[in-house]
Image (cartoon, coloured by chain):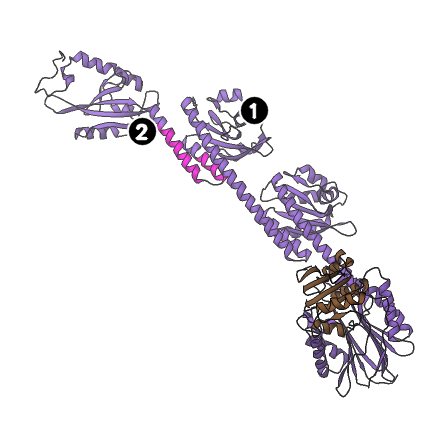
Amino acid sequence: MKGTGLELAIESRPLGERSCAVVVARGEIDLSTAPELKKALGSEQCGAADVVVVDLGEVPFVDSSGLAALLSASRDLDAFGLALDSQSAVHRLFELVEVDDQLRLFGSLDEALEELAGELR
Amino acid sequence: MSDDPGPGPGATRPSFASLPAEALIAVVESSDDAILTKDLEGRITSWNPGAARLYGYEADEVVGRPVSLIIPPHREGEDARILASVLEGKPVDHYETERVAKDGRQVVVSLTVSPIKDESGKVVGASAIAREITAQHRTRELGGRLQELTSELARRVLPDEVIEAVLEKAVGGLGAGAGTVGLLDEAGEEIVLAGSAGYSEEGIANWARFSIDAEVPLAVALRTAEGVWTSTREELRGRFPALEETELPFASLAAIPLATDAGEAFGALALSFAEARPFDTEERDFLLECGRQAARALERARLYEAERRANERLEFLAEASTILSGTLDLQTALEQLASLSVRSIADWCGVDLLAEDGSLNNVAVAHVDPAKVRMARELRERYPADPDADRGAPGVVRTGEPELYPEIPDAVLVETAQDDEHLRLIRELGLRSAMIVPLAVRGQVLGALTLVASESGRRFDESELSLAMDLARRAALAIDNSLLFKREHEAALVLQRALLPRSLPDVEGVELAVRYMPAGPGLEVGGDWYDIARRGDGTLAMSIGDVAGRGVPAASIMGRVRPELHAFMSQGGDPAEALVHAHRVLRDLDEETMATVLQVNFDPRDGSLLYARAGHPPAVLRRPDGRVTMLAGKGAPPLGVFDDCEPEVHSASLEPGSLLLLYTDGLIERRSEPLTSGLERLDHLMHEAPESAESCADWLIEQLGGQAIPDDVALLVMRSTGASA
């Protein structure tokens, strides 16, 4: 299994008193790389944070395995959202598959963090 | 200042002339050299004691007789030539030649011949002074022979060539009548005859191999690392009674050890001479030195050969590996391997593999001569191998231990043979040496590899056994892989047959076509599915779905969901209910998984259609007037992830002649472009698609990439014909 198509990094971004974990992804999220994303989303860092956002700004492609990972995370994590361009192919995919209700989609990282942190109060 | 008068000024005659005659005679008489004088006819006129000692004749025996008496046949006429030369005024000075003594012994002499003149200066005869140089000559000769041997050995590369050179130079150069070279075998227990010259075939037939402890000169020289010298036949017989029966046309024998510089003897050279030889110190030293040179050359050659063999082995193993990894067709690979083996390392090669039922099957047999292969096959058919045999392939398979027969004893053939005829036939095959090694991998024995030498006269030893084991390891791995792949492939096929409906229900008013193409090399299964159920109320339920993932894991989930869904949708109910049921089934599974599904109910009688979607691409409808629409009513998210599932049901109406396409995203999703582009393309294609369901299905797939489609694809095409129910 080649898992070299995806780079992942978890950054910590405190927002006021809230701790936020940002999972920055670069590359394709598919059958071979989805497990890494799942692992990152299931990590302690994400579990302990108040808010978790996945930055999909540099992700050109997500397949069903990637989608499954994101959907599972949205089920398991309380405040979870995705930051991506609303015109992007991935956004369109989410619309077509009709997960744009279940998944919280935001146009930018800052917007995602503010909204989600705001909802916690 | 001396009182010696000496020759005064003006003296011209040699100083001898001043001596009285008696003094001159005394000089001649007391000289160690042989001095003789002869007249112009070549008759001996005087003969000194030195000559008597050298030639063995007393003066009275030879004076008056021609000097040719002491000239050997091969030097015939030399005397006349010498005389002629002297007469012309050309002196003969330190001329080396041979003379023959009274007892027949040849001596080598250095001859100086001068004219004898009378007072008038006329030559009346000649005087010859001969100094024996037999010893120096011999030393020089021996030195020369050693040189020759050394330079010849330097030119020889392989052990056989070295041995040949040694025997050539020894037997030829030293005047030996015959010679043999024996080398210690790997086990250090036997001496093998590695070369011989001057013996008849029968003469040495019994000495091909013998124990190192034998009481024969070669063995003694090897054991003691010292020379063995017997000068006469009696001495030889006396010291080595074991040679009693052997023909011994030779009188004296020298056995010289061949040893490393460290002193370890690994062989010996024996030389036999027709005449009795004293083997004096000089000769012994010489022969021992020859032995040393030969040993060095032989060692060098053996190292070279070992390296060459090692390289050949590596090449052979590399080629074998290439064959084994070149094809997954096991039969072909093993046949090719057997062919390679009989070209390189054996005369026969056979491969036997264990079948599922525990029986041993012969899978490949090779010999360079196809006629022999046929014969071997016939033999096997007539006399099938005894599976309970202790030896041979069955035995090796049972014990997992290799068998090596450097020489196949006749007793083994007798044991193996099932009757006299069988014994006769296998004797005819001329099998000489054999090795049988297990084909084992991960502790499990899969079969056996048999290598036999017959015509080539090869003799297998430990080092070749280890090569065979190397080969067997590689072959076993390849066999294992191939079997594994075969089993996996078969399992996948069985799975596929079980997972998806093969036959389509025959429904009036509807034409159906389905296609299923899993991606991935060699695999036949995936997570996509199609399903159709004809319901009791005359309606048709269709579903198309996609479990996330690929291959066996996805198929295994699909295999549990689809049948449940089928059972449910066959009973009745609307599409949303079916989706909820599928969702529950997925949630109940141990695995965390997700599936997109499109569920459709169609009534062929009135063309009414209901559908519900869960994360799945929309069905595409082409109406008879050519309009293409996507059935994209709002759907639910993919099934199996969230707790709840509340899909909406939507409806549509189909006129007769409509074409409906249900598919999975593999048909339209490509990495390089967004899904929407794929949908657009599909929209356009549906405009052009052929009428009939089957043609439409084929055409669409072809248009969208055919076999090159990178993901699993399932599709279902339905054409409503409008025929009444």
State which mark lies toward you, 2 or 1. Answer: 1
Which chain gets the brown colouring?
A
User: Where is residue A57, by image quadrant?
Assistant: bottom right
Q: Chain of mark 1?
A: B
Q: Amino acid at mark 1?
A: Glu
Query: What residue would you read off at disc 2?
Result: B73
Residue B347 coordinates in the image, percent (x, y): 61, 47
Q: Is residue B469 above or below residue B128?
A: below
Q: Is residue B149 magenta?
A: yes
Q: Residue furthest front?
A: A16
Give neighbour class at mark 2: few <14, some 14-19, many 20+ (Cα, 10 Å). few
Residue B193 coordinates in the image, percent (x, y): 54, 34
The front one of B650 and B521 is: B650
Give neighbour class at mark 1: few <14, some 14-19, many 20+ (Cα, 10 Å). some
Which colour denotes chain B? purple
User: Where is residue B560, by image quadrant?
Assistant: bottom right
Is A3 situated left or right of B584 in this image? Answer: left
Residue B307 coordinates in the image, percent (x, y): 53, 42
Q: Is residue A5 above or below residue B300?
A: below
Query: Which region shows up in magenta?
Result: B140-168
Counting residues from the N terminus, which is met first, the one under dot 2 or under dot 1? 2
Residue B100 coordinates in the image, percent (x, y): 32, 24
Query: What residue would you read off at disc 1?
Result: B215
Is B642 situated left or right of B360 in this image? Answer: right
Q: Are marks 2 and 1 in contact (CB under 8 Å)?
A: no
Q: Is residue B391 above or below residue B640?
A: above
Q: Residue furthest bottom?
A: B625
